[in-house]
Amino acid sequence: MASSALLRSSKLLYNDAPILKDLEQICCKIAKKRRRREAIRAHLECSLSLSAMAGTTPISSSSNCKKRHADENIKDEARRHGLLSSPTTFSAKYVPFSPGKLSKEEYSLDEVIYRSKTGALLDVEHDMEALKKFDGAYWRNLFDSRVGKTTWPFGSGVWSKKEWVLPEIDDDDIVSVFEGNSNLFWAERFGKQVLNMTDLWVKHCGISHTGSFKDLGMTVLVSQVNRLRRLGKPLLGVGCASTGDTSAALSAYCAAAGIPAIVFLPANKISIAQLVQPIANGALVLSMDTDFDGCMRLIREVTAELPIYLANSLNSLRLEGQKTAAIEICQQFDWEVPDWVIVPGGNLGNIYAFYKGFYMCKELGLTQKMPRLVCAQAANANPLYRAYKDGWEKFKPVKALPTFASAIQIGDPVSIDRAIYALQNSDGIVEEATEEEIMNVCAQADRFGMFTCPHTGVALTALQKLRDRGVIGPNDRTVVVSTAHGLKFTQSKVEYHSSELADISSRFANPPIQVADDFGSVMDVLRQKLSLR
């Protein structure tokens, strides 16, 4: 190289060889940095060129530095910077969910349809060949460039991956509260002291607008309904059957969009916190003397007769939003894939959504492997667990019994085929948790700084059992998906710590201590509890 040649011709070369050696090393480092800068510049130029073709220009720092005009909103600002509704070469469509079977049947996402001609579930299929024209580095850079921004609609953890979700929707039709981007919490003390693990993480999907992961899917579904209504589709509103969290998400997003929401709830089977959310958001709430499966049957009959769009996970649009949580996990680990991901399962759409997100990351070159997936079920509603124990030879619906994990109290899950496919293709496992196990592990985890919902307790119980059997190793990077916020389930926590739960031994109960209002009594209690002399 020129710099080295120049040094060799210098008298310094002969007078002080050690100094020359140091200078040569410095020159080598400078040359390497120069080559690296040139490579980065070339990659960015290529990315910008490809982005212009695809309508996915990364958000530049210069454009974000410009202040929004006083009379602009964030959509207006995005338009001015040319980021809103740019043309795209990407597309997606409905196809029958029939892995390994060829089918010519397909539908536009603008059609109101939930099943194939044969009655099979539908899946949203993306044009993977178009997506593969961009390498993994491009997608990583694009997604990373959108994190932490308020640029519409990319401030959302879901819509920051728009090209992989609903690539053809107009950004003006998107209904978002910038959901997603949820915390990935290192459960250091709980992992070390309870499970002897060094790398345990909790993905807090419940830290969201309505307090559950359902927001991730509902922003996609309600956005598409908003689009359909603007296209003139005669939709009166959106309806769902729910055990609580789905109705909360649906009612909130419909309220944000000005679309009527209709909710079917099983009477006396959800928490007050869950019930009040759709009521507060103005939904039409029908409380029915049946369980979730009965509500699901009725809403399907109603949506077959009336122009009401069905919002349950029978509708595959929601899974497109939910899969972004898997992409987000990879992103939060600097695009490395954890060894294990444990997901609570009821209607079973979420386990497939996580599989799909991880699969797309691997297939499109963002990551190198798939994690092993674990689906955790409550023992009182465990049809998938029973099928797994039978070697997947048969599946039989069950009558779901009451469980503290009310959102997964489902005995006849709609997405059973999707779940089995996801688990079989990720070397997956299914575990179950009894009611006592659920409540005790929730209380135990809370003592380490969490505030868990019962569904997270189901997943934590599954983790404990797999650790006890040595299936999950002490150093395996493991992510437990927390699907709802613990504040939705305060009543069961109060009853637990008051030891008022029937047939539950509250091993970690921590009730308040009644003390007289005098200094001596207070000091007596403190000496006893704090082991003071």
Image (spheres, helix red, strand yellow):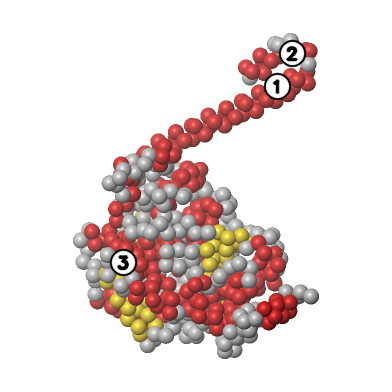
The label on residue 12 is: 2
Question: How far separated are the C-alphas under marks 1 and 3?
Answer: 67 Å
Residue beneath the point at 31% across and 66% down: 255
Q: Quadrant of residue 5?
A: top right
- The three-letter code of the residue at mark 2 reads Leu
Whether the residues at callouts 3 and 2 have beta carbons within 8 Å, the answer is: no
Q: Is residue 395 above or below residue 61?
A: below
Label 1 neighbour load within 10 Å: few <14, some 14-19, many 20+: some
Whether tag 1 and tag 3 are in contact, CB under 8 A, the answer is: no
The residue nearer to you, when weighing 148 against 71, is 71
SS state under label 3: helix
Q: Nearer the viewer, residue 400 or 356?
A: 400
Name the residue located 76 percent from the left edge and 74 percent from the top edge.
Answer: 532
Question: What x and y, as percent, mark residue 380?
Answer: 53, 83
Q: Earlier in the sequence, mark 1 or mark 2?
A: 2
Residue 162 in picture, x, y percent from top left: 39, 52
Residue at the extreme bottom of the image, as rendered: 502
Q: Which residue is mark 3?
A: 255
Which amino acid, by three-letter code, is at mark 1? Leu
Asked if residue 438 is positioned above or below residue 206 in the image, the reply reads: below
User: N-terminal of the two: label 1 or label 3?
Assistant: 1
Residue 174 can be seen in this image: yes
> Which of labels 1 and 3 is toward the front?
3
Q: Is residue 107 visible?
A: no
- State the mark number for residue 114: none
Query: Residue 23 — which label?
Result: 1
Task: Give the side of residue 522 with respect to residue 99, left or right.
Answer: right
The residue depicted at 70 percent of the width and 22 percent of the height is 24
